[in-house]
Amino acid sequence: MKTSQGGIFSLGTSSHVYLEWDIANGRTAAELVTGIASLREPRTTIGGVNLVSGFRPELWSQVTPDDAPAGLHGFNQPIAGVEGFTMPATQHDAVIWLSGSAYDVLFDTAHQIIADFRGLASVAEETTSWPYRHDRDLTGFVDGTENPSLVEAPEVVGIPEGKPGAGGTVLLLQKWIHDSAQWESLSVHDQEQVMGRTKPDSTELENKPATSHVARTDQDSFGHIFRRNMPFGTTTRHGTMFVGFCAEQRPLEAMLESMAGVTNGVRDALTRYTHPLTGAYYFVPSTERLHAAAPPSDD
């Protein structure tokens, strides 16, 4: 039985680094897959690093067609919503997500990977993240209230056995920048109307507006996902890294279309206070298929 990469489920980590890569001119997709597949987490149980690797769907399909889910595609076109709102497409060739208990270890690990990949691929987008007040994002609201438990999450994340890509998952990665001044000018009541939840305890509002974030991303309607969102940035420029996993791409796509107002012309009110800067889909293969793509060990 194939298993999803373990770092997806490593909750409680206090530091995160997201590295998105573009392959260098003259290098092949197979070389990039082999290079990333050869990476291993540092062999330590104290202050260690979780490593999750994914690939542009078309690139993975080119290299490993028998392990590619049918119809899976990159974020190749922006999503044009209502009122001029757009979600940009900034698809890259691969992603490496590092997480751990201390940023210095992540820094050293990322620094070494970048050095090892010189001439093979370059970092197109780099973001560092950290938790805020345990489980809140920088709007002050709890993030991930509807997340499945760790017992349930593997079934939400992993493609079922017997299907192409079994044990793998689809990752949606977006960077959202917050308009904090505008958001903080709202009363708590008005913020709750935007979110569709109470701010202190994240209770869903009984009469939430149709424009609220909860209403526009209702997982009972679109399908369930597993989120590992994290805050990023500085005190003057900050936001949320949306890190969403699902066994199928469509629930992720449908939520974005609903937020943008593509579905029925109703735009998510939260998009008036936070704006997407990036957007990419990656196929995160199972641990077994990723290791199979690595070169033979010298041990």
Image (cartoon, helix red, strand yellow):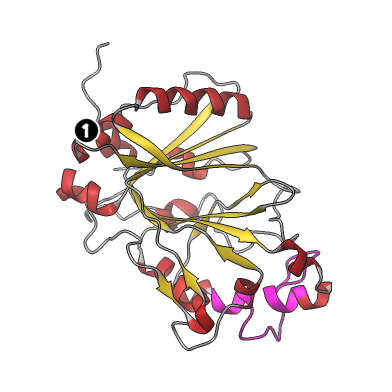
Instruction: Say if the magenta span includes residue 146.
Output: no
Vertical comparison of 131 with 57: above or below: above
Q: Which residue is mark 1?
A: 31
Compared with 154, 1 (above or below) is above
Q: Position of residue 188 (x, y in %)?
A: 82, 72
Neighbours of disc 1 within 10 Å: few (<14), some (14-19), many (20+): some
**Left or right: where does residue 122 sit relative to residue 259?**
left
Magenta segment: 191-217
Q: Quadrant of the N terminus?
A: top left
Q: Position of residue 36 (x, y in %)?
A: 32, 33
**Residue 138 in picture, x, y percent from top left:** 71, 56
Amino acid bearing label 1: Glu
The vertical placement of 268 against 44, above or below, is below
Q: Is residue 208 magenta?
A: yes
Quadrant of residue 47 in the image? top right
Residue at x-position 66% and y-position 69%:
273
Could you say which is closer to the camera, residue 13 or residue 21?
21
Percent across and percent down for residue 9 are 51, 44
Residue found at the far right of this picture = 187
Q: Residue at x 26, y 51 (%)?
A: 165
